Amino acid sequence: MRRAMMRVRPEYFAWPPEQRERYGVAIPEDDSAHLDAALLEELFGRTYASRDEAVAAARDLPLSDLNRWNETCLPLTGIGEDCFYLNECFAEGKSILDFEALRDFDEDDHRFQEQAHQTEDSAYVPKPYRGRLYLNWGRLYVDGRFTYVTLTMAAGYVYAEIDKAGRDLLDTRIPHDYVPGHHHGKAEGDATQWDMRVKAGGQEGILEELQHRIWNYQSSRYENQRTAWDQKNLCGVYLLDESMEDEANLHFVFTDKDALAAVRFRSFLRDCRALARPVEELHRAVDEEKEALARFVEEQHTEVVRTYDPKVARFRKRRKVMVMKGAFDKLE
């Protein structure tokens, strides 16, 4: 990175730290393109005939090269003592430097989302702020090691766990799969229709009804959990190591909005460690919710089987999903 910067913007090294940070979080487009070309040559020995080709190559790096690229760029694009980088889009003219603490960013996003809901639906009742983070992504150095991080509120973490558990319980009760429908793959301009239908051995109606009941239950529990965790006033952080063999990953789970207020971006890891709580607390909360969900699914499955009438169908909105050309290329 240092050699690349010397080629593109050598005066960077004479700037004060504040100016370096402002540059790193909003690199000018022309500099960014030249840095892409320089780094591709430095890291992988690849050269390109034009700037546009280098930019496209950097944007479409294969996963095998992406970790090395992200680690190399982090000292430039991250801030503070951990080189913290938040993988989020900011409003025009704003960056992570506009938010001192994690709560400042999260509460600003909450206000934006609630205003958007009100714009779309005049009858929408704004929800109080109780911490909104849900599986947000970031990157930083943890004791010198490049690490990917996930940021989630405790209520959101519990919800994500019972969401997975709900899918497993549903599949155990009614084994099912998804198969292409009549319109799957139908082209319309530059888009293709996505039409996958459930196949459950003749129990499709029962499955759909039970699935909707599970979703409604989980949504209700999520709202209850958000309020319950907020009222506990624990002001803590659970640090979950979710590293894989060749990739370091940490999941930071925050108990409430007070914990977010106590964690600053410039001293992120140090502040989180100061608030660390035993992860067993979180695991117990998840286990309790899973047990309650299992009881609910058992009761509701029995009820649906008893009352289901195949001649009566609920009216439910069916969305038409169109996939733009190239959207799944990287997944392939």
Image: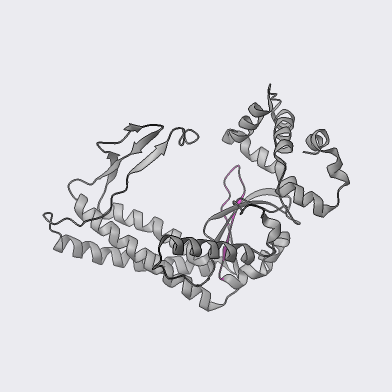
178 on left or right of 4: left
Looking at the image, is 245 positioned above or below residue 100? above
Q: Is residue 251 magenta?
A: yes
Residue at position x 28%, y 53% in the image: 317
Asked if residue 54 shows in the view, the reply is: yes
Total numbered circles: 0
Residue at position x 11%, y 54% in the image: 311
- State which quarter of the image contains the N terminus: top right
121 on left or right of 24: left
Q: Position of residue 46 (x, y in %)?
A: 69, 25
Report the residue that reaches farthest toward the left: 311
Looking at the image, is 114 positioned above or below residue 96? below
Looking at the image, is 9 positioned above or below residue 227? above
40 on left or right of 191: right
Q: Position of residue 37 (x, y in %)?
A: 71, 30
Looking at the image, is 323 positioned above or below residue 106? above
Quarter of the view holding residue 56: top right
Quarter of the view holding residue 264: bottom right
Residue at position x 61%, y 73% in the image: 258
Q: Position of residue 289 (x, y in %)?
A: 40, 67
Residue at position x 71%, y 46% in the image: 74
Q: Position of residue 137 (x, y in %)?
A: 58, 52
Q: Is residue 154 magenta?
A: no
Report the residue that reaches farthest toward the right: 14
State which region is magenta.
241-256
